[in-house]
Amino acid sequence: MTTISEQLEARRNEARLGGGQKRIDAQHKRGKLTARERIEVLLDAGSFEEYDMYKTHRCVDFGMAEQQVPGDGVVTGWGTINGRPVYLYSQDFTVFGGSLSESHAEKICKVMDLAMQNGVPVIGISDSGGARIQEGVASLAGYSEVFYRNAQASGAIPQISMIMGPSAGGAVYSPAMTDFIFMVKDTSYMFVTGPDVVKTVTNEIVTAEELGGAGTHTKKSSVADGAYENDVEALLDLRRFYSFLPLNAEVSAPHQPSTDDWDREDTSLDTLIPDNPNQPYDMREVITKLADEGDFFEIQKEFAGNLMVGFIRINGETIGVVANQPMVLAGCLDINASRKGARFVRFCNAFNIPILTLEDVPGFLPGTSQEYGGIIKHGAKLLFAYAQATVPLVTVITRKAYGGAYCVMAPKHLGADVNYAWPSAQIAVMGAKGATEILHRADLGDEEKIAAHTADYEDRFANPFIAAQRGFVDEVINPRSTRRRIARSFELLKNKKVQQPFKKHDNIPL
Ligand code: HXC
């Protein structure tokens, strides 16, 4: 006779087997971990507490009454990552292809409700054939229940999506409403309509990978924020990423003690800016030299490289960095960079993460493709996001701050708290050459005169002191001292409070 404990263990083991060993082997053969193995890699050892392990679907059509698998294709519950709690769900492709039934959706909604109630983030691991075909509208309703919660949770708790298999059809819209999406190369894809439908409707022949693989979404569409070689690499880096985030919108990100001296000077920064203003340098070097232990978690590394965004720590505190990259498009702001920057600034502001802006921007990218594509509206997103941000804002102008881009990139006038400039900064309406050609049109063709006008303009404007005279720059600093300056500033700004006028919500130019 078996004991009650043995019976319980037998039931648990049945649930743990999901769709059976054959399907587990098939999952492994594709280079994918199972839903439970993924949880094991992601969470601290022994911390996972599973809910609804025995829950099954209620469908009786298409012979489904005889096909009951405990758990119904999704593993849900909570655990810890480096000791900090997280709710999660992990779809089990071995059970009906991880498809979403009414019960499956109820399990996801339960952990989302608990997460919102308890102020704890949610991580969703997607590996699913979409709506459970046998259930029809019941499964569609389940999706909408999840979507509703994604919207409710947005800005209240961080939501992170890890795409580790198919995510097709309307199923893509749950990840799309979360804060960050990460994908695994070659084994995951996201699209609203698959290659077959695309072929039927538009005659385009495209593979699933080309249509919605990690490469497409990290380089072209910007739907995804990062891509990894395999499941283990992705989940281990997610553990690292999680450490930068606060649990909810009412608390700060965790302090991480560092052995890196907060007032460390870096003399190499003094000589980083080339003498020739048209010569690029690598702003990523500035970021890593300012960061605790050089640790920079970059978001959307492969998209709109002219603007880098991501998380660092300074003196143990999480800081969101927005930085122009002179190595790509000379650091110009374009549609893609504006959208990328705006969304990042909004995330940081929603979750109390102070923002450091490193500025070297010659302006907005000119051209018909930009104007036709709506750079006016997209550029306004970044402007709006900064203007609305109430978290501590520190800006360092390393070189160019020209024109409209100066107005957008967290100047004092938009509410930035502390604005520094390196001695190499040039703050003006435009570059010397362009300015001279407009101001002295009559002298065009007379090289000597034009050279003299250009030199005069450079003398007057290619420096940070005119802005400093007006108080638009608080201090011109030695590049080597930047880390100490910004660490002190952020420390002082910790209790910043800003009064906002009453509104239901803003109307950011979407
Ligand atoms: C029920 C499903 C299923 C689904 C897969 N399965 N998708 N069962 N509902 N949506 C089952 C299969 O029958 C199979 O069962 C097992 O999962 C594995 O599927 P395979 O096809 O053998 O795997 P693979 O070759 O890897 O192909 C995976 C796949 C394909 C690309 C995801 O299964 C597929 O195209 N599925 C349908 C996708 C789809 O059109 N979904 C609806 C989208 S619309 P056995 O028993 O053989 O293991 C949608 C609406 C959402 O989602 C609306 C929200 C707004």
Image (cartoon, rainbow, N blue to C red):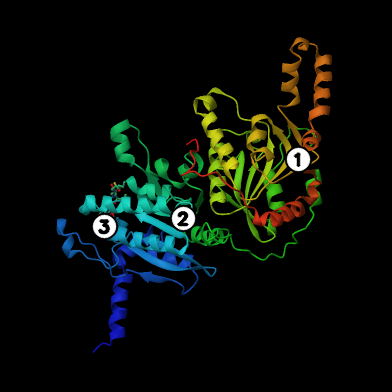
Residue that mark 3 sits on: 102
Q: Which mark is residue 473?
A: 1
Comes first in the chain, label 3 or label 2? 3
Kindly report the distance in space between the C-alpha atoms of the residues bearing marks 1 and 3. 57 Å
Amino acid bearing label 2 = Gln
Horizontally, residue 30 falls left or right of residue 20, namely: right
Comes first in the chain, label 1 or label 3? 3
Label 1 residue SS = loop
Q: Position of residue 260 (x, y in %)?
A: 73, 62
Mark 2, Cα crowd under 10 Å, few <14 / some 14-19 / many 20+, is many
Report the front residue among 441 and 18.
Answer: 441
Q: Which mark is residue 158?
A: none
Image quarter of residue 450: top right
Comes first in the chain, label 1 or label 2? 2
Report the front residue among 236 and 25.
Answer: 236
Residue that mark 2 sits on: 159
Q: Position of residue 16 (x, y in %)?
A: 33, 71
The correct choice, above or below, for 329 with respect to 97 in the image is above
Amino acid bearing label 1 = Val
Label 2 residue SS = strand
Label 3 residue SS = helix
